[in-house]
Amino acid sequence: MLSLFVSDFAYSQRAFRGNYWKQQRKELIFGIGPTNFLGDLAGKDQIGSDFYQDLEINSTRYVVNLGFRYFLLRDVSVRASLSYGVLSGNDALTNEPFRKNRNLHFKAPITEFSILGEYHVLKENWGKRHKIKGARNNNGRFGLMGFAGIGIAKFTPKSQYFDGQWYDLQPLSTGGQGLAGGPDEYKTITMVLPLGFGVKYMINRRMKIGLNFGYRKTFSDYIDDVSGSYFDRATIEAANGPVAGYFADPSLTPINQVSGTWQTRPGEIRGDDSDKDSYLFGVVNLTYSMQKKRGYRKIKKRRSVPSF
């Protein structure tokens, strides 16, 4: 019994001093959780606002994540992260008059790869409590860390037509992109800047469960296909067909009557092009520590002493 106590205590102490952390510097991560979009569509019952002030819970969708973490120092690590999720927004969810009348909606599958730097403010550890005077008792199983980094994301905005099908919006030039007198075509790849924090709990020496909350700032205003002003609907229909014309301006109550047809006057605001899109990931993750096997030095055999 005493030998088991001493062994467990020795393991607990090694975990907090020396280079023992190097035996646990590689980790595999799997996660799943909710996403939320912060852009032009949907949002609160108000004119578009920054960050959480425009968060619409009913637009929540999902994300799955795979990652690999490597500890450079005891409290500093880098993480490679690959995520796939869906972002969504719908003007029908808000009661703000302009947004609701605009009547646009979208979903966008998004794939993100990022490299993150992490600082572990509190490092979780495995061990038992020992009431020994003078012994260091760092055995908390909870951990806290912050992260920031850089990444790249590929998105595909889509919208549903009356026939029930979901159409890719970027090729339809719903804002006049690529047409004469219209803005340039937008890219469906953007750089992202992830920022956030995470909490972890150590289940055993190899497994941890945690929660990461991350905010992604992007350099695109077209994740929801909406930015800038309305373009002439007739020109869009002539170039890309009636489906494109509808998605360009499906307003519930047209603001102006132009050339005998109801549509919003070209040049009026369709979306806010002064603020780029962003999104949120909340991931419940399971972490597996790829512990390095401890080696043991061979004890040299003592040569027999000759007898006389």
Image (tube, grey):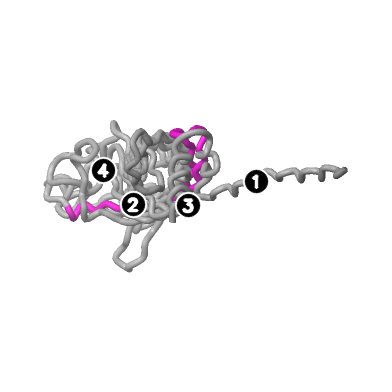
Residue 84 within the magenta-colored segment of the rendering: yes
The numbered mark, 1 or 2, whose residue comes first in the sequence reads: 2
Mark number for residue 296? 1
Q: CA distance from mark 1 to mark 4?
A: 61 Å
* Type of amino acid under label 3: Ser
Residue at figure coordinates x 29%, y 49% from the top left: 36
Q: Secondary structure at mark 4?
A: loop
Q: CA distance from mark 1 to mark 3?
A: 20 Å
Q: CA distance from mark 3 to mark 2?
A: 56 Å
Answer with left or right where residue 51 lies relative to residue 222. left
The numbered mark, 4 or 2, whose residue comes first in the sequence reads: 4
The numbered mark, 3 or 4, whose residue comes first in the sequence reads: 3
Mark number for residue 264? none
Mark number for residue 3? 3
Q: Which label lies toward us, 1 or 3?
A: 3
Highlighted range, magenta: 67-93
Circle 2 residue: 87
The numbered mark, 1 or 4, whose residue comes first in the sequence reads: 4
* Type of amino acid under label 4: Asp
Residue 98 within the magenta-colored segment of the rendering: no
Q: Magenta segment, principal secondary structure? A: strand
Q: Looking at the rendering, which quadrant does residue 197 occupy?
A: top left
